[in-house]
Image (cartoon, helix red, strand yellow):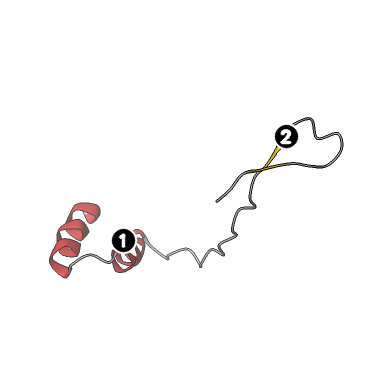
Amino acid sequence: MTIEPVTERGSMGALRLPRARVVPLSAPPSSYTAAVERYLTGAGIAKSSARIYRISLTT
């Protein structure tokens, strides 16, 4: 990511920041348990670690 100086007249030394990337949101989970499962699935951790996190997050 680079920050470029604005070269337009009257910019008075302003900096142009890169545009943010828009990430579409998926549908919200139906319950807290579903949210935990979605999070653990996307986390990319070992099944044994996911089991410990699942217990911790749901108790």
Q: Which picture quadrant has residue 52?
A: bottom left
User: Image point 86% across, 34% down: which residue?
Assistant: 10
Rendered image: mark on residue 25: none
Disc 2 is placed on an element classified as loop
Residue 29: percent from left, percent from top:
43, 65
Alpha-carbon distance for marks 1 and 2? 43 Å
Number of residue marks: 2
Left or right of 38 on screen, residue 6: right
User: Image point 20% across, 63% down: which residue?
Assistant: 50
Bin the neighbour count of mark 2 within 10 Å (Cα to Cα): few under 14, some 14-19, many 20 and up.
Answer: few
User: 32 or 53, which lies in front?
Assistant: 53
User: 4 or 18, which lies in front?
Assistant: 4
Q: Which picture quadrant has residue 11?
A: top right
Mark 1 lies on residue: 36
Where 30 sits versus 20, above or below? below
Q: Nearer the viewer, mark 1 or mark 2?
A: 2
Where 37 sits versus 11, above or below? below
User: Which label's residue is closer to the chain start, 1 or 2?
Assistant: 2
Mark 2 lies on residue: 14
Q: Are marks 1 and 2 in contact (CB under 8 Å)?
A: no
User: 18 or 57, which lies in front?
Assistant: 18
Left or right of 47 on screen, residue 27: right
Farthest right residue? Answer: 9
Left or right of 55 on screen, residue 28: right
Disc 1 is placed on an element classified as helix
Mark 2 residue type: Ala
Residue 8: percent from left, percent from top:
83, 42
User: Image point 16% across, 64% down: which residue?
Assistant: 51
User: 17 or 22, which lies in front?
Assistant: 17
Mark 1 residue type: Val
